[in-house]
Image (cartoon, rainbow, N blue to C red):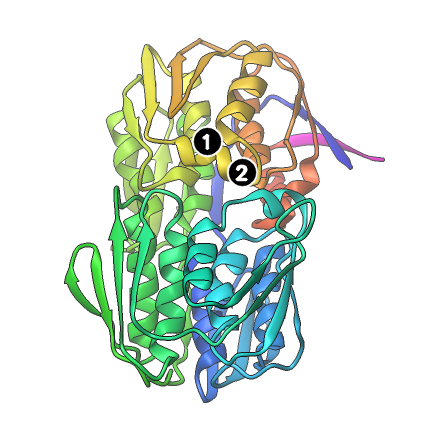
Amino acid sequence: MTTLTIVPNALTGNVWVPSSKSMGHRALICAALAEGESRVENISLSKDIRATQRCMEALGASFSETAGKDGRVTFTVRGGYPRQRASLMDCGESGSTLRFLIPLAAVDGSCYTFIGQGELGSRPLDPYEVIFRSQGLRFAYGKNSHFPLEIQGPLSGGTFTVPGNVSSQFISGLLFALPLLPDASRLEVTGTFESRSYVALTLSALKAFGIRILEESERVFRIPGGQAYQPCSGPVEGDFSQAAFWLVAGALGKGMLVQGMLPDSLQGDRAILPILGQMGASLVPDQGGIRSHHACLHGTVIDASDCPDLVPVLSVAAALADGHTDIIHAERLRLKECDRLKAMATELNKIGAHIEERPDGLSIDGVSHFTGGTVDSWNDHRVAMSLAVASIGCREKLTLTGAESVAKSYPAFWQDFAAAGGQYEQYNR
């Protein structure tokens, strides 16, 4: 475990954010399903991206990679219709990998065993279990958790219903797989359709790789069968969920120039811009990026239904803002790598915040500063990075345990933190 003792300091400078992990997953999956060769450029490597690569290789694709000067990677991918090369699907701690690939592994009728680490084995898979059992397919959990999970297809086309308030990943997973089935399918989202922007990202990737999905309405998709993915090459855009840490750091510190994002991105986490704006932040386009100026933030109401990954760092901004903030429609954060609502409330309250947990969110009364002290990452990358940003508002040193958890999505975070003026001592044990 890595422990950092951080000296409070106002961060400033400029940073190139990692490529979008959400779009990276989608592009690699589509490339691995396309017969022929595709190039996926500008990938920032992380444990989650490696998990998707590893599992797509088990499904028969081959990957070669070329590293650029900035450490980012271009993958050359040769793929095609899923054909089993290995039966073990090791998803690491990646919920996207697990939920995206269960339906794909059921396309060809082979038997696959899914495994994972951390809290991944306790995250809900009920919508898939219902579908598999309704078609008489194998869906067998391990004794003490979901893992090892054994599944076996082949899936049949038809009508599928999926709840929209558990995770959009189930919808995306089916959208990847159903076009490959011989028969047409209809996919209906029931109940509240949360995180729809993530489905928009999936539809965008599918279109780029030649797949047709017909939207009958906002919650009904018609998927022609017998389709084939077509090769496609291009770069992956920057990640707004990672940019959010630096945009908040700029508002709390001395300003940051955050580069590498598309201003018209479909990413739901682009919501960081209007949310910080309504809190009083000054965000302006500059040099092909966004400059976040120092600002006196004030409380507001934050609806997290379409941008749950922003909640940890926004809870830091709200805790240091003037007045009261309510974060609502965030109940799904209790089912992430950890219970992120409890984690952020617990750790920020340790250092002087005034945060009350609610079933679906957080109630936050802002304070002028944090005290400093010892906090823990809960083995969650977004919690760790948010607490690093919280150090800006501390009066005394902040000691963070589990700092290595950032490797899940942003392995270079601490190097970028130091380049922006962050000062820390590292201890390993």
Question: Which span is picked out in magenta?
Answer: 423-429
> Is residue 427 highlighted in magenta?
yes
What residue do we see at 49% from left, 51% from top? 125
- Circle 1: residue type: Val
Residue 177 drawn above or below residue 304: below
Residue 239 drawn above or below residue 158: above
- Lower sequence index among marks 1 and 2: 1
Q: Pick the residue in front: 317 or 268.
A: 268
Q: Quadrant of residue 402?
A: top right
Whether label 1 touches label 2, CB < 8 Å: yes
Q: Pick the residue in front: 34 or 100.
A: 100
What residue do we see at 55% from left, 38% from top? 420
> Is residue 110 highlighted in magenta?
no
Q: Is residue 68 visible?
A: no
The percent position of residue 238, horizontal first and vertical second, equals 42, 56
What residue do we see at 60% from left, 47% from top? 120
Identify the image quadrant of the C terminus: top right
Residue 253 drawn above or below residue 208: above
> Residue under circle 2?
382
- Circle 2: residue type: Arg
* Label 2, residues with CA under 10 Å away: few <14, some 14-19, many ≥20: many
Q: Is residue 191 visible?
A: yes
